[in-house]
Image (spheres, helix red, strand yellow):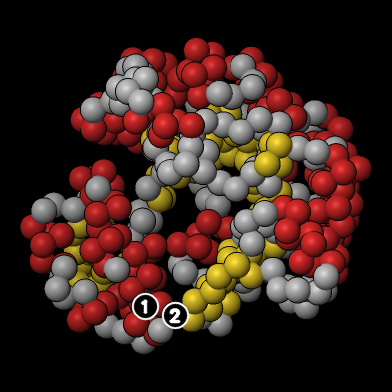
């Protein structure tokens, strides 16, 4: 399979209190210089990609002129692309940008709705309301996007199962094909973690968060959104191919500040500073902040750790062809314990073991399972 291409647009109109992705407040002059660099890099790419994903930050924080420049640079690479996703936030999305995306090759939209509860949006520090969120999804659909994904957050302090259920029942009525549900996490160096440490609020109990997750699985599946990964649900044929490429541990290239690439068994990360990224590129210096050459053993173990996240789990023949390792021998030290804990189960065909996958309990403890394989 051809590699994927990820482009990081690290600009936001406001930084969310829970976000630990690299981003800075949008400035026209810096954004213009940054897009000059990214488009020049695109012009020097000498390979074809299976998927393209423009993420952030907030790509739609860019004005129409800069977005057009970026998308036109990608046109050569996107003509025969399987999937071309662009992320958007409701407050920075308009009809002109949607028209531009469609005319220049994008065929999948990912909208950062996060919630359709105004009180919840305000507490999370979002700068759109539920009305704007719903309008942005409907506008994208009416303007021609057939494949629309939304992000949702659950498990916020003071949130209850009833209000979460109400949100889910509202979003399944929208013209969407994909939902990503993430439980709220308290990441390092975020205002949210500082507030938690200062005891500004009390986080939800794990049992309450687990109940919300189970509720999402049940309601979304009831409305045709099949779970295919821990946090992701889609209508038939609308799985995110770009993310599937990550979960199969395939190669990908990353452009932009803080973006990660994985090629030839080497994982590298770009410098996490927009202005430094621009200076280094224009000065002909390396953009790489750190890199690691993975051994064949580590690559195999990482493949196991990411592939187990998917609903289908790990097929033993697929794993051997992918890594040259026998999965059961590779992970013989942890498999019995994970099965005994009720996290995973064997898959059989004609009474022959063909693979493993997460059980429902395993989805609740997926980090534990992935860490065990590493």
As measured in the structure, the alpha-carbon distance from the residue carrying label 2 to the one carrying label 1 is: 6 Å
Q: Is residue 119 above or below residue 104?
A: above
Q: Quadrant location of the C terminus?
A: bottom left
Name the residue that disc number 1 marks: 298
Question: Hey, which quadrant is residue 232 in on the image?
Answer: top left
| Residues at marks 2 and 1 touching, judged by CB atoms closer than 8 Å | yes
SS at circle 1: helix
Please rate how many residues cluster around mark 1, counting C-alpha atoms within 10 Å: few if below 14, some from 14 to 19, many from 20. Answer: few
Mark 2 residue element: loop
> In this image, 153 relative to 60: left or right?
left
Q: Which residue is at 28% across, 47% downward?
A: 363
The residue positioned farthest toward the front in the image shown: 198
Q: Position of residue 345 (x, y in %)?
A: 18, 59
The image quadrant where one finds the N terminus is bottom right
Q: Which residue is mark 2?
A: 294
Residue drawn at point x = 58 percent, y = 77 percent: 263
Tell me where residue 250 appears, x and y as whole percent. 52, 71
Give the vertical position of 181 relative to 289 (above or below).
above
* Residue 98 left/right relative to 116: right
Q: Residues within 10 Å of mark 2 (few under 14, many from 20)?
A: some
């Amino acid at each position: 399979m051809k590699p994927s291409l990820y482009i990081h647009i690290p600009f936001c109109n406001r930084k969310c209190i829970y976000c630990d992705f690299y981003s800075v407040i949008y400035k026209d002059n810096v954004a213009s210089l940054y897009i000059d660099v990214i488009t020049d890099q695109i012009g020097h790419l000498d390979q074809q990609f299976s998927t393209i994903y423009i993420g952030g930050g907030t790509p739609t924080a860019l004005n129409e002129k800069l977005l057009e420049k970026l998308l036109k640079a990608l046109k050569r690479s996107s003509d025969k692309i399987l999937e071309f996703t662009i992320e958007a936030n409701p407050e920075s999305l308009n009809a002109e940008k949607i028209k531009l995306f469609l005319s220049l090759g994008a065929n999948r939209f990912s909208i950062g709705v996060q919630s359709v509860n105004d009180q919840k949006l305000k507490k999370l520090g979002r700068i759109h309301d539920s009305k704007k969120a719903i309008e942005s999804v409907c506008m994208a659909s009416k303007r021609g996007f057939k494949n629309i994904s939304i992000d949702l957050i659950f498990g916020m302090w003071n949130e209850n199962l009833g209000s979460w259920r109400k949100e889910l029942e509202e979003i399944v009525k929208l013209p969407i094909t994909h939902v990503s549900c993430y439980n709220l996490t308290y990441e390092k160096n975020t205002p949210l973690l500082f507030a938690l440490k200062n005891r500004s609020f009390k986080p939800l109990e794990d049992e309450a968060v687990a109940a919300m997750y189970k509720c999402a699985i049940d309601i979304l599946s009831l409305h045709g959104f099949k779970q295919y990964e821990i946090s992701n649900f889609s209508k038939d044929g609308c799985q995110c191919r770009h993310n599937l490429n990550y979960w199969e541990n395939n190669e990908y290239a990353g452009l932009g500040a803080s973006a990660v690439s994985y090629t030839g068994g080497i994982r590298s990360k770009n410098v996490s500073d927009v202005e430094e990224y621009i200076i280094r590129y224009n000065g002909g210096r390396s953009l790489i902040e750190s890199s690691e050459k993975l051994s064949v053993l580590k690559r195999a173990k990482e493949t196991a750790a990411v592939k187990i996240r998917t609903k289908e789990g790990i097929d033993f023949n697929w794993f051997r062809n992918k890594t040259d390792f026998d999965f059961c021998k590779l992970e013989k030290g942890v498999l019995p314990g994970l099965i005994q804990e009720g996290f995973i189960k064997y898959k059989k065909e004609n009474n022959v073991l063909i693979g493993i996958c997460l059980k429902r309990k395993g989805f609740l403890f997926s980090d534990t399972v992935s860490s065990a394989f590493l």
